[in-house]
Image (cartoon, rainbow, N blue to C red):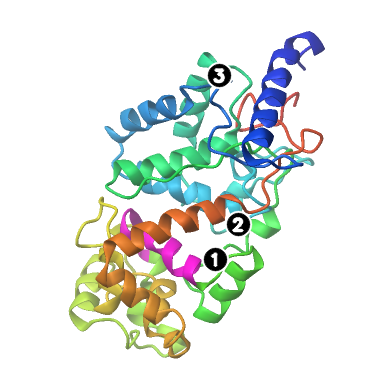
Amino acid sequence: MASSSSSRPAMAALVMAALLCLQLTGGATAQLCEDYYDYTCPDAYNIVKRVLIQAHKSDVRIYASLIRLHFHDCFVQGCDGSLLLDGVRGVINSEKGAPPNNGSARGFPVVDAVKAALENSCPGVVSCADILALAAEISVELSGGPRWGVLLGRLDSKTANFASASNLPSPFDNLTVLEKKFKDVGLNNVDLVALSGAHTFGRVQCQFVTDRLYNFSGTNRPDPTLDPAYRAFLSRRCPLNGIPSALNDLDPTTPDTFDKNYYNNLEANRGFLNSDQELKSAPLAQGVTAPIVDRFASSQAAFFARFAQSMINMGNISPTTDPSKGEIRKNCRKVNGS
């Protein structure tokens, strides 16, 4: 465990940043703000960006993977970096092992590399939770998507929540379930449709579409909402009794570009995941989420503007800002002193 003298600079930096945020927001309690690291780690954004650009050279999927980490972190006890914690027998049941993350959540070594670069430049200053928020915005920007001012100042949790991580929004959820899961964390239907637009880039495993191709809702038939030509294409990519982990583009048109094509795919009944197509084709969607899909399909500017706002909204899910309840981890995989 660090001595009290070695921890004083980091604590002083934390207090300075918090006071700056209070002054800028005019609040009486700690809040997130864009300028949180302006004095304590002014090059933080550029440091994160440099590491991500380097990582992308050998892993074209990394940008989509990093934004997914931010999603899966924020939906479980808030945006607090809990997803990054490794398991400790009898102490921490890691969220990484929960079904929605096990074998699919990826990018942790890149987060480690970002943390190491930040610790080298400004030790004990930038939280792992904020690294995820910054990495998500930079990943979208570098893929052709919108920029937004990332609100910062989160502390890292000292706990994980395996049970909550097991109940993340699922590719198999219907619209009613999706609406509830988003509402439970303070997000509305516009946020649901906008944030689902992150599926405009990245890859997904065959196992998440197999039922739609061969046994939709236990009927032994394909999902009738799937475009026949797209269904035939996916059946070749994901044959019955094929390799469940085989990867496919979420967006077959521009798989590595952040654009509005996700919504155009939904309009053409070419959503890969059931949870995606539900936003357009479910009976409940008419008059609820389908008009939002239509609006984003017709205007990339409208999608980009709302996606940026919805990312800010999501980043505000229960952030830990009280130093008595959180910390700035030196290693994103473990609680300080453990």
* Observer-nearest of 107 and 125: 125
Which residue is rendered at x = 57% and y = 58% of the image? Answer: 99
| Cα separation between marks 1 and 3 | 33 Å
Q: Which mark is residue 35?
A: none
Q: Is residue 203 magenta?
A: yes
Q: Which mark is residue 119?
A: 3
State which mark lies toward you, 1 or 3. 3
Q: Are marks 1 and 3 in contact (CB under 8 Å)?
A: no
Left or right side of 38 for 228: left
Quarter of the rendering occupied by the C terminus:
top right
- Where residue 251 sits, quadrant-wise, is bottom left
Which residue is rendered at x = 43% and y = 53% of the image? Answer: 308
From the top left corner, tell me how far across and down residue 49 is, in percent: 38, 30
* Extent of the magenta region: 190-206
Name the kind of residue labelled 3 in the image.
Answer: Glu
Name the kind of residue labelled 1 in the image.
Answer: Pro
| Cα separation between marks 2 and 1 | 8 Å
Name the kind of residue labelled 2 in the image.
Answer: Phe
Residue 102 appears in the figure: no
Q: Earlier in the sequence, mark 2 or mark 1?
A: 2
Q: Earlier in the sequence, mark 2 or mark 3?
A: 2
From the top left corner, tell me how far across and down residue 335 is, in percent: 71, 31
Q: Does dot 3 land on a helix, a strand or a loop?
A: helix
Which residue is rendered at x = 32% and y = 69% of the image? Answer: 296
Q: Which residue does the numbered mark 2 point to in the structure image?
A: 75
From the top left corner, tell me how far across and down residue 155 is, in percent: 67, 36
| Cα separation between marks 2 and 3 | 27 Å
Q: Is residue 188 magenta?
A: no
Check disc 1: other Cα within 10 Å, few if <14, some if 14-19, many if 20+.
Answer: many
Q: Which residue does the numbered mark 1 point to in the structure image?
A: 169
